[in-house]
Amino acid sequence: MKMLEALPIELQEKICSFLDGATLLRATCVSTQWNRIISGLQMVWRQASLREGFGTPVKDWKLHYVTCVRLLQRLKKGKAFQHRHFAPKCFQCSDVRDVVFWNGCILAGIKKCIRVWRVEDLKPAAVFDVPYEIFCLSVSFNNHVLGVGHYDGAITTWLLDEVEVRASLLQCYVGHRDNVVCLCVAPELNLMCSGSRDRTIKLWCLGSGQLLETLTASGWVSQVTLLPAGSHNSPYELRNSLLAADQSSIRLYSWPVQHGSAYGDIDTIEASDLSIAVDKEVSLRKFLLQEKHIMYVQDGMIVVLDLVSCAQIKCFRTEYRDVVLLASGARYVLVTMWESCLKNSKLAVFNIADGELVGTYPMPFCREYVVAGDVEWLNGVSGQRPNCLVAAGWMMGVLHMDQLTDVLHLITWLPDHL
């Protein structure tokens, strides 16, 4: 130990860099001196964190490594989450049309109004009315604009105020002939994309409400996502892109960026060679995106495909055939799995790198309207905070306070000391 103390810090780091994180932790327990020296080697702990996929710029890399290891162990043991029920009195679960998570709040579309609850205390935060019956909700990437798809084919957009938790009407869009099933709002492109049961995909100017382009799908459209040129998910540097899923397939469309136009030359939009066949039985949420990769479910397996080369990167099997992809990060993907015949439902976390199941966590059977909460931790099990939302879903006919009722079920992180 005296020899190690006498060495310059560069050599101390070089020697300890050959050890993995678990060995380093055991070494810190040998003596006070070992703990002082090894704990102070920030570059060594940074390397250990990056090897395990815990990489986030922090000041204390050893504390970061220990925190992430502890959390990963709790995830594997199924002891990282807690469950809470909330039974609203003013409506029935069957009235709920869609649910989204925004700024620490749950937003639920219920007939012709949107109700907002804070996750931390489940207290009502706001209620605001919309002009038509709601079919779907979508919050923009910057969390400032809410898109509302309606039963009659209309769309409305609303500016969200984080301070006062309220919404102001921005624009109304009319063009679909049937229910608006999905939306993607992209203020950075001044664009909005919508999909409908009328088997069309429409691109709109977000600010003016002008219809820019209509594409035809082979079935009613269940999911749309806009990819700005040069974004970390976009397969192209100089082309804007659109991913759209109908009942049985996923297609990629693109169009060139145009100087002086926020949304580019949409008149030249064209379909790429990427066309993915997916199960019709899979839920409306057909795919997720992560770093130029698309993730989708086929025959009970999660498939990861490269958007640039169209080559399959990896494929891993899940426990059940019925799987919904909730959210993904650089390291992990969060999904729900269930068996409808047994009313058996689970929340699961998979490691994207090797397809290994990190852990599963029982949850009440909620087939519809399951939404992910804070997802920063999926980049490397860091960034989670006690009582923050992991996932939420509506359930019908649950025994609550000795009577059957409809409840909002929330899964949140346990406090660290429990």
Image: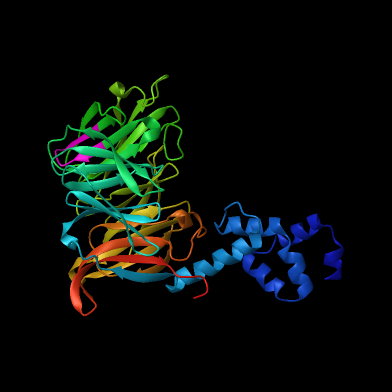
Residue lying farthest to the bottom in this orientation: 402
| Residue sitting at x 30%, y 22% | 268
Is residue 418 rendered to the left or right of residue 177? right
Q: 157 and 259: which one is in front?
A: 157
Q: 394 and 342: which one is in front?
A: 394
Q: Quadrant of residue 394?
A: bottom left
Relative vertical location of residue 179 with respect to residue 323 in this rendering, above or below: above
| Residue sitting at x 19%, y 47% | 134
Is residue 177 rendered to the left or right of residue 63? left
Relative vertical location of residue 150 with respect to residue 382 in this rendering, above or below: above
- Residue 362 visible in rendering: no
Query: What colour scheme was applied to this rendering of the protein?
Result: rainbow
Q: Position of residue 114 (x, y in %)?
A: 25, 51
Q: Does the magenta-highlighted stretch encompass residue 110?
A: no
Specify the principal SS of the magenta part: strand
> How many numbered discs sit on the rendered protein?
0
Q: Quadrant of residue 183?
A: top left
Q: 245 and 384: which one is in front?
A: 384
Residue lying farthest to the front in this orientation: 164
Q: Quadrant of residue 358?
A: bottom left
The quadrant in which the N terminus is found is bottom right
Q: 373 and 37: which one is in front?
A: 373
Q: Position of residue 333 (x, y in %)?
A: 40, 56
| Residue sitting at x 76%, y 74% | 32
Residue lying farthest to the top in this orientation: 260
Q: Position of residue 120 (x, y in %)?
A: 40, 63
Q: Position of residue 26 (x, y in %)?
A: 67, 73
Residues drawn in magenta: 194-202
Q: Does the magenta-highlighted stretch encompass residue 201?
A: yes
- Residue 287 visible in rendering: yes
